[in-house]
Amino acid sequence: MEKFEEVERSIIKRFRKGIWGRFVSSVYDYKLIEDNDNIMVCISGGKDSFLLAKCIQELIKHSPIKFNAHYVVMDPGYNELNRKMIEKNAKLLNIPVEIFESDIFNIVANEEKSPCYLCARMRRGCLYSKAKELGCNKIALGHHFNDVIETTLLSMFYGCEIKTMMPKLHSDNFPGLELIRPLYRVHEEDILSWVKYNELTFINCACRFTENCSINDESDSKRLEMKNLVKKLKEKNPNIDYNIFKALDNVNLNCILGTKKDGEYTSFLDNYDE
């Protein structure tokens, strides 16, 4: 049995509950992938995006849903070592990646205040453009359960609003394109266990400004703060992350001071006497 076959078997067998089951439930419950979809699966080179690619491949083999997938890597200016590692892992895992290049790292090189924020926005724009070029109607990203929880807490603690990372959303700037997150319910600890079990090695961050981002990017430090907070809270309540996640699917509008939809605010007082 080749290495990629062992990896595929582990997703279906050993990690059936923690990874495969949660991946499939996200796909079906949130209607992320449907017949005739043409999906661009974005691979950054990290553990999450490579796992996403393998799960998509398995879904094509085992699901009654008939759809097509393109596995795409955008190279914004990776160093040679990281580029080769991405190519090596793609070959090892039998993922037919298409690599296209951009000049994003050079463009944001002189950005002092928030290079990571600018880089992320430019990368997203390039990916949407590539998806259009490929004739895709959906873009799949590797965000997972922990990303959802941390984003929710960041919005509450620093954004003064209750909102979360959605399992799917329509693009505002690219009509006809939809972004989906099939690993929405998959926990990072299970992804790490999958990596360790299969003795795989992925890049953590392929950005040439990694040290700069870690020190200077305020959003990065705040996300780490949320990650550490959840870890601390789980020591007393192991279900705290799940409870936060479930609360977002169980909002009691009778006990909310105000809501906002499409930029329009509604106070509880507006309908209080009705």
Image (spheres, rainbow, N blue to C red):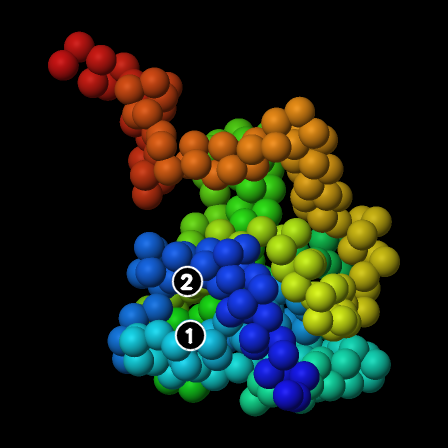
The numbered mark at residue 168 is none
**Disc number placed over residue 59 in the picture, else none:** 1
Residue under the image location 55 percent in, 81 percent down: 72
**Residue placed most toward the observer, 81 or 109:** 81
Amino acid bearing label 2: Val
Which x, y percent locates residue 92?
A: 68, 85
Could you say which is closer to the camera, residue 118 or residue 44?
Answer: 44
Relative image position of residue 194 (x, y in whole percent): 66, 64
- CB atoms at circles 2 and 1 under 8 Å apart? yes
Q: Nearer the viewer, residue 252 or 273?
A: 252
Label 2: which secondary element: helix
User: What quarter of the picture does the N terminus occupy?
Assistant: bottom right
Q: Amino acid at mark 1?
A: Leu
Nearer to the camera, 178 or 56? 56
Give how far apart the Cα atoms at labels 2 and 1 are: 8 Å
Residue 129 on image: x %, y %: 47, 78
Could you say which disc has been placed on residue 24 in the image?
2
- Report the residue at 80% width, 52% height from top: 214
Left or right of 198 in this view: 272: left
